[in-house]
């Protein structure tokens, strides 16, 4: 059902979904671009590979916490409103980034430093547990008829913009302060900056129109105890929708897994292999910026030609190109990184731009934040977010040849999920 919103309200909704998501995901993504420096600062050892493995392990911990955040924040979005949930998530993210930027290193406080980094990364993961899917849900519900794909892709583009901002910020800081200073203290600057941009995102979300429709079936909420009971009630509904949860997991896993391999792992891997992290981040920034427009195109194509056909062709393109592109990227050269990302940017971004609206409309309106957020977070925690960790481990055991292949079964699952979603309609 299309909401009765003015053009101005729809404009503010689209802007809040795009920029608010970008600011939050900048905070979350910047960790991956300074993973090597964090490994040296918090997980010292004789083997650089083990340092990176430890740092990417903490990167993966953030994704493992996303289901926890979705279990708490997702029902809140369904019960108390999308705006409240999205505002709460960005506050948690801003505080976490500030504390990481101020955190003493292993040389200063010993093993406690690594433990604190893990805890703060967990808090970041908790924050984004319902942020990305909540923004997509919000944008889809705020869209005019025939524009849901486009507006939802703006939320996706916002997340990708956050990754690009993170990559650009790290590249600029590394170029200004130098590689040595970046490893010593420069890695703190992107996190400290993230605390300030979170405040901007919170200010933007104050003026968002609410899109959650009234639900007379949900329990009354007039106290914290009643809120807890309502959240349990909502989670029980999610359990009853387990088939739908599995469908959404299969729908979104493959493209996101390829994205994290190509635009997170390969960037760090190439930076170490070539000896120029700044150059690797610069390449990723340029290609991801181009990808923003392609993701928005994916949403527009979903409106024009249908959500299911665009998702089907996008996933097919990834199945055909991902093994070749990742094999090229694993050569560890700056040129090979550019070629690998260039081959993947169109199918990855088109699919990511089109899959959000399909994931939203598969779920009944009153359960969207909970079901969609939990399903998406589980997909990221179990598969996509752990992909850089898996690739690092395969490299350390000299089995990198497996990396381009192990994502392919998820591609087959995505095609099956798209086929089973063929009767979905925007509602």
Image (tube, rainbow, N blue to C red):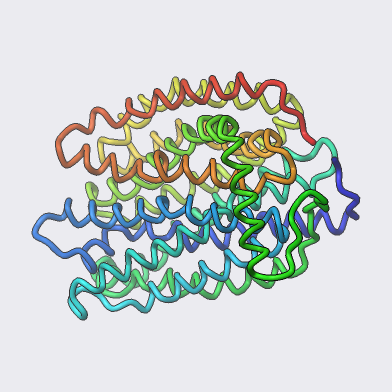
Percent position (x, y) of residue 242? 56, 34
Which quadrant of the rendered structure holds the C terminus? Answer: top right
In the image, taking residue 365 as reference, residue 403 lies left or right, namely left
Q: Residue furthest left?
A: 46
Asked if residue 282 shows in the view, the reply is: no
Residue 84, by quadrant, is: bottom right
* Residue found 62% across the figure and 20% down from its top: 420
* Residue found 60% across the figure and 53% down from its top: 232
Q: Nearer the viewer, residue 420 or 35?
A: 420
Please tell me whether residue 308 is drawn above or below residue 81 in the rendered image: above
Residue 323, by quadrant, is: top left
* Residue found 56% across the figure and 26% down from its top: 314
Please tell me whether residue 57 is drawn above or below residue 287 in the rendered image: below
Asked if residue 196 shows in the view, the reply is: yes
Residue 73, by quadrant, is: bottom right
* Residue found 86% across the figure and 48% down from its top: 3
Please tell me whether residue 344 is drawn above or below residue 11 in the rendered image: above
Q: Nearer the viewer, residue 218 or 395?
A: 218
In the image, taking residue 347 as reference, residue 210 lies left or right, namely right
Percent position (x, y) of residue 371? 61, 43
Percent position (x, y) of residue 399? 19, 32
Percent position (x, y) of residue 287? 49, 44
In the image, taking residue 402 as reference, residue 202 lies left or right, namely right
Which quadrant of the rendered structure holds the N terminus? Answer: top right
- How many labels, in total? 0
Please tell me whether residue 304 is drawn above or below residue 159 in the rendered image: above
């Amino acid at each position: 059902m299309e909401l009765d919103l003015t053009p101005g309200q729809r404009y503010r909704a689209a802007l809040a979904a795009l920029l608010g998501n970008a600011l939050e995901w900048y905070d979350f993504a910047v960790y991956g671009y300074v993973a090597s420096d964090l490994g040296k600062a918090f997980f010292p050892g004789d083997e650089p590979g083990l340092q990176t493995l430890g740092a990417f392990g903490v990167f993966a911990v953030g994704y493992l916490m996303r289901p926890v955040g979705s279990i708490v924040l997702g029902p809140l979005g369904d019960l108390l409103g999308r705006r409240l949930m999205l505002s709460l998530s960005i506050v948690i993210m801003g505080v976490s980034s500030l504390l990481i930027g101020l955190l003493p290193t292993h040389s200063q406080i010993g093993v406690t430093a690594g433990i604190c980094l893990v805890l703060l990364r967990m808090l970041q993961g908790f924050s984004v547990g319902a942020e990305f899917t909540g923004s997509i849900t919000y944008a889809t519900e705020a869209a005019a008829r025939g524009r849901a794909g486009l507006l939802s892709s703006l939320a996706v583009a916002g997340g990708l913009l956050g990754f690009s901002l993170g990559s650009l910020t790290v590249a600029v800081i590394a170029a200004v302060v130098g590689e040595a200073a970046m490893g010593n203290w420069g890695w703190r600057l992107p996190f400290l900056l993230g605390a300030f941009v979170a405040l901007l995102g919170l200010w933007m979300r104050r003026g968002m129109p609410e899109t959650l429709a009234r639900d007379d079936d949900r329990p009354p909420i007039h106290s914290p105890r009643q809120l807890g009971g309502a959240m349990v009630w909502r989670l029980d509904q999610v359990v009853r929708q387990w088939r739908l949860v599995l469908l959404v997991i299969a729908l979104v896993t493959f493209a996101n897994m390829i994205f994290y391999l190509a635009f997170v792992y390969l960037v760090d891997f190439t930076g170490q292999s070539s000896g120029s992290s700044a150059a690797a981040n610069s390449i990723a920034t340029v290609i991801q910026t181009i990808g923003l427009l392609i993701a928005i195109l994916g949403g527009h194509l979903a409106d024009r030609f249908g959500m299911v056909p665009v998702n089907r062709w996008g996933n097919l393109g990834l199945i055909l190109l991902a093994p070749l592109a990742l094999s090229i990227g694993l050569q560890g050269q700056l040129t090979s990184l550019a070629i690998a990302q260039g081959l993947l940017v169109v199918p990855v971004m088109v699919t990511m731009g089109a899959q959000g609206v399909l994931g939203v409309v598969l779920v009944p309106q009153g359960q969207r934040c909970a079901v969609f957020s939990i399903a998406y977070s589980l997909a990221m925690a179990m598969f996509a977010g752990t992909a850089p960790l898996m690739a690092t481990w395969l490299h350390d055991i000299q089995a990198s040849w497996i990396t381009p292949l192990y994502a392919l079964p998820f591609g087959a699952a995505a095609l099956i999920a798209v086929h089973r979603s063929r009767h979905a309609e925007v509602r």
